[in-house]
Amino acid sequence: ETGVTQTPRHLVMGMTNKKSLKCEQHLGHNAMYWYKQSAKKPLELMFVYNFKEQTENNSVPSRFSPECPNSSHLFLHLHTLQPEDSALYLCASSQGGDDSPLHFGNGTRLTVT
Amino acid sequence: SQQGEEDPQALSIQEGENATMNCSYKTSINNLQWYRQNSGRGLVHLILIRSNEREKHSGRLRVTLDTSKKSSSLLITASRAADTASYFCATESYNQGGKLIFGQGTELSVKP
């Protein structure tokens, strides 16, 4: 196990649905991240939280809404998504600071119909 | 913005052979990291090399960094079928606000 747990593993939703992705880390890390991985494209950083405070929003559309209630939990709330939002959404955590490698969860495979 | 670019995009070798993957980047960096991703899974951190280091080893992995050429290589020696995965380089730099920027990855297939 990676120490970072994501649920659900798979999600199919219509464009008018509202759903949430959940991430929990058991590593005592201070920083948490959402990445989007689409086929044939590099990982795209979406959001960064340090000590529960959002420090990065990488020009992500407002139909994606992150929430970080504490340093161990991270959510990504989804509403009125588009088919091109279908991708693997990866959560990661790190100690924060320089030279801190990322620890990833196994992702949520999202399909928007 | 994409920083690291891996080469080749895909590599197929026989078990026991060595696999070499290359990564080039554009701006100065604090460190460069290599990650591995098995199909349908998350990325796993393999090794981190700092900008003032030239070579690092971890088990069957050897990473080199040439900051003058802005390039790095990952060598996997005596490959195994279980090494089949995608391998990504990622760069961290103050120019990028400390963010980790990933390349598109190399798909390695090791045939038994």
Image (cartoon, rainbow, N blue to C red):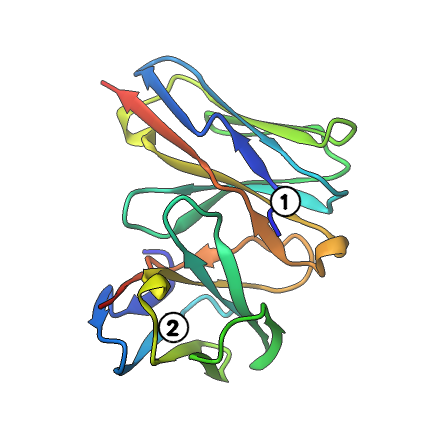
Q: Amino acid at mark 2?
A: Glu
Q: Is residue B65 left or right of residue B41?
A: right
Amino acid of disc 1 = Gln
Q: Secondary structure at mark 2?
A: strand
Label 2 and label 1: CA atoms lie apart by 29 Å
Q: Quadrant of residue A105?
A: bottom left
Alpha-carbon neighbours of circle 1 within 10 Å: few (<14), some, or many (≥20)? many
Instruction: Say which residue appears at 76% left-offset and 54% top-offset.
Output: B95
Q: Position of residue A90 (x, y in %)?
A: 40, 61
Badge number at residue A24 = 2
Q: Residue at x 33, y 57 (%)?
A: A106
State whether residue B76 is above or below residue B41. Answer: above
Chain of the residue that carries numbered disc 2 in the rendered image = A
Q: Are marks 2 and 1 on the same chain?
A: no
Residue on which disc 1 sits:
B3
Location of residue A16 by image quarter: bottom left
